[in-house]
Structure formats: C-alpha cells, structure tokens
Image: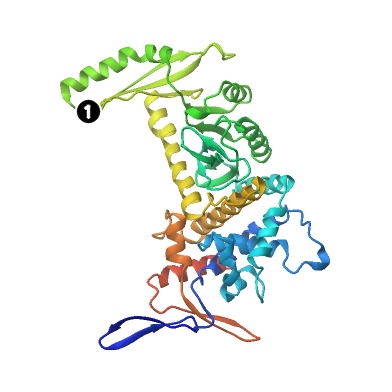
C-alpha cells in the first residue's frame, strides 16, 4: 500500500495510508436510519416503483437501492462512482439495513435508468402523501409557494435547450414548498413558459389537500413569472387565494406615476429611502376578467425609482400584504438553494430525462428526511433552523472506528467530536420508543 508522507512535526515523520480498516466518516447516517424507520419515508417511496428486473436474479431489493442512493446523497456523495467503495462502508450498510456489500455503481445506474413515467408520477404522489401525513391535526392555512430555477447542463442530456435569460443550456425545474415542507420537484425542459404545468400541478395539490383537510384555507404564492390569467381565474373559481408578482407595462406604469413622483420628491427633500403603497384595479385585454386588485410599492432610493407590483384577491392592508405575505416567499429561495447546493438536485448528468427526474426526486427525499430530523430531533437546539448542509457537517459527518461480530456492531465515535451532547440528544429523541 502506497504511503503518503507529510511535513515533519518536531523531528517526527507524519505518514498516512489507507489501511485503517473498518473506519467510517459517516457514523451520523444512523440518525437518518432512525427517522426513516419511524416515518417509513423511503419505504413509502420504494413501493411506488415498479421493479422491472427479473426477480430470480435480483440481489438488491428496490428499497435497498432507494435507501442507498438517498442516504449517500444526504451524506454528501452525489456521484454514482462514489459507491464503488462506499458500498463496503459498514455504517452505510447498517443504515440501509443490509449486512453485506451494497449495490455497485453500475447496478444503481441501471436502476435509475429503468425508472419510467409511471414510477415518477407515483413517487411524486407519495411525496404529497408524506406532506399530508406530517400533520397531526388539520391546519387552518397553507401557503403553497411555486418557483422555477435553472439547472445548468454540461452535456447532451435529453431535453437540453439554450435559455436566453440564464445564458446556458439548462433544465427549468418547478419547485413547490409549504414553509419548509417540500411537495413537488418537477423537472421541465427550459424551452417552456416558466409557468407551464403550474395550473395542472396546483389543481392536483388542491384536490388532494382538500380531501384530507376540507376546511383549510389555501394561498397560492409566486413571483411574476406565474402571473397568468388561467391560474388566477381557476383560483377565483375554486376558493383559492393568490398573491403573485406582476410585470410592469405602460398602462401599469401610468397608474402609479403620481405615487412614484411623490416618492421621488420626498426623497430629494429628505435624502431618505421612501416607500409608498397604492392600489388600483387592472385588467389586461387578454384576461377574461373585469379587473383585479394590483398593489404598487412606489420606492425611491439613492439608486433611483424602484417600483414593484403584486396582484392578489386577498383583502387587507396593501403594505402588510406586500411586506408580510408576499415578501415572505423569499424564504423559499433558501429552500431551493438547500436542494441544489446541499442535496445536489442539479446533478442531472444522466442522458435520459426520466433518469434525471429520478435524481431530482432522490434529492427531494433526502431533503424530506433531513427536515424531519430537524423537526423531531433538533427542535430547541442550535441546529433547529440550520440548513441541510450545516446539519450534515455538524451531525452526520462523524468519524468512527467500527468493530463487529455475530452479536453486535459497535461504532466507537471520535473522542474529539465537538458536538457530542447534541448528538446524544438527537439519538435520544429519535430512538425513543
């Protein structure tokens, strides 16, 4: 075995090699196993997949394949090639609930490329069912945040198109969150209207949520890319409230000219940022509607005029609706960043579109699991509002020496691990009867 030699310490050689044996850097993945055992999240998702393999030749069950891919993603291993050696990690095997080698990267690759449209639809439905099951009692209000983001591509993936706004070849996945709860991760090509398929998904969500919670108040919230007459008209017809951004045009600018001028005059006199709110009724010629409520934020700063418009069917003070309700949607962008940066939802490097959608759903399942750990094991701790990446670093990436025999598997966690009390607390919360 090749040895690596580092700079000396007080005359002593510092040498390293990879002959340590049963040592893991992922002991914290057992916490994921515990929350998954309680809530049966990967089991629920696995049952939605139609295994097309020859059962007489199957060594690794669908559930094991799903768990292996999801747990590894949570631990920071986004590449299938990582499983070439990761499959022999005892901590990962224990989390997945097998006592021998996990599946190879080639087996995982074949599996994700076997996923078809029906599998993806069924998995997506189960994500919504998991969201509904997370409530112990019927909620009074749910705000569904819709947003799209770019997923840059670097190869010849199926459905790859150049997007002028993002200036790259990319996908344009649609995300739906309710607070920190993820409901939908839907992969779309980028040659579409940003709001494409939004109404169809919104209808499905509303119908299912109202089956579970008949009296719940539902609000559709999104930016100006989702300001579409069909969406707003459907919401009005089905007792759904909406609040979205709205792009400006000459007519809209004319309605707010007086207020913008007033804000500019006060700024010139005081040299302090000015924010004035005004509302008016507006209807585009293409709308099948007499007029809808538009709220203007007439803002003027040292950089000049900065008008913003939102459109809504919700009653209330214009400034409160803008500041407290509409602007709160910005938190969803943090959730999307977690999905992309911490859980690699943009690792869509497969050739096939459906295989890439599966990867997006693997990332979604990973997010759901970490969010459940955040809720059940970290409430009241310093990680109660931490990002997925921080939770991974602080709680899941722990070094341990592993010993095992026929009776037990023992993980000797690092004595210098700085968050031992936090880890013990999380274990107590998740492993309680």
- Residue extending farthest front: 156
| Quadrant in the rendering for residue 113 | bottom right
In the depicted structure, whether residue 328 falls above or below residue 73? above
Name the foreground residue: 263 vs 171: 171
- Residue 34, image x, y percentages: 58, 66
Q: Which class describes the residues within 10 Å of circle 1: few (<14), some (14-19), or many (20+)?
A: few
- Residue 257, image x, y percentages: 33, 13
User: What's the colour scheme?
Assistant: rainbow
Figure label count: 1
Q: In which quadrant is the C terminus drawn? A: bottom right
Any part of residue 35 in sight: no
In the depicted structure, whether residue 351 falls above or below residue 164? below
Q: Residue at x 54, y 27 (%)?
A: 241
307 lies left or right of 221 = left
- Residue 115, image x, y percentages: 71, 51
Q: Tell me the element at label 1.
A: loop
Name the foreground residue: 416 vs 237: 416
- Which residue has dot 1 on it? 302
319 lies left or right of 114 = left
395 lies left or right of 182 = left
Any part of residue 91 in sight: yes
């Amino acid at each position: 075995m090749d040895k690596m030699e580092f700079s000396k310490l007080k005359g002593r050689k510092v040498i390293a090699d990879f002959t340590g044996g049963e040592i893991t850097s992922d002991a914290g993945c057992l916490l994921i196993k515990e929350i998954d055992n309680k809530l049966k999240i990967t089991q629920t998702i696995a049952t939605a997949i139609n295994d097309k393999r020859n059962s007489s030749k199957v060594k690794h069950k669908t559930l094991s394949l799903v768990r292996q891919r999801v747990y590894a993603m949570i631990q920071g291993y986004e590449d299938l090639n990582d499983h070439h050696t990761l499959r022999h990690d005892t901590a990962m095997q224990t989390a997945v609930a097998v006592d021998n080698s996990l599946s190879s990267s080639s087996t995982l690759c074949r599996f994700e490329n076997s996923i078809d449209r029906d599998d993806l639809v069924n998995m997506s439905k189960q994500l919504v069912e998991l969201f509904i099951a997370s409530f112990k009692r019927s909620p009074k209000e749910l705000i569904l945040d819709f947003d799209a983001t770019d997923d840059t591509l670097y190869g010849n993936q199926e459905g790859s198109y150049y997007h002028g706004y993002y200036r790259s070849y990319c996908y344009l996945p649609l995300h739906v969150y309710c607070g920190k709860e993820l409901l939908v991760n839907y992969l779309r090509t980028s040659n579409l209207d940003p709001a494409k398929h939004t109404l169809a998904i919104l209808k499905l969500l509303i119908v299912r949520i109202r089956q579970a919670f008949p009296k719940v108040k539902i609000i559709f919230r999104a930016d100006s890319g989702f300001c579409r007459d069909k969406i707003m008209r459907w919401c009005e017809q089905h007792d759904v409230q909406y609040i979205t951004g709205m792009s400006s045009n000459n007519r809209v600018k004319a309605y707010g000219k007086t207020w913008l001028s007033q804000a500019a005059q006060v700024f010139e006199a005081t040299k302090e940022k000015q924010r004035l709110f005004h509302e008016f009724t507006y209807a585009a010629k293409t709308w099948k509607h007499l007029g809808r409520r538009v709220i203007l934020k007439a803002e003027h700063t040292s950089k000049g005029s900065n008008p913003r418009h939102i459109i809504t069917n919700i009653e209330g003070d214009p400034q409160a609706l803008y500041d407290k309700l509409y602007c709160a949607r910005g938190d969803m962008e943090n959730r999307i960043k977690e999905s992309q940066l911490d859980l690699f939802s943009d690792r869509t490097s497969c050739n096939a579109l459906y295989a890439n959608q599966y990867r997006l759903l693997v990332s979604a399942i990973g997010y759901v699991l970490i969010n459940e750990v955040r809720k059940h094991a970290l409430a009241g701790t310093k990680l109660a509002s931490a990002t997925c990446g921080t939770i991974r670093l602080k709680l899941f990436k722990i070094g341990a020496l592993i010993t095992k025999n026929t009776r037990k598997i023992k993980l000797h966690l690092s004595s210098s691990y700085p968050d031992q009390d936090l880890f013990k607390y999380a274990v107590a919360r998740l492993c309680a009867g």
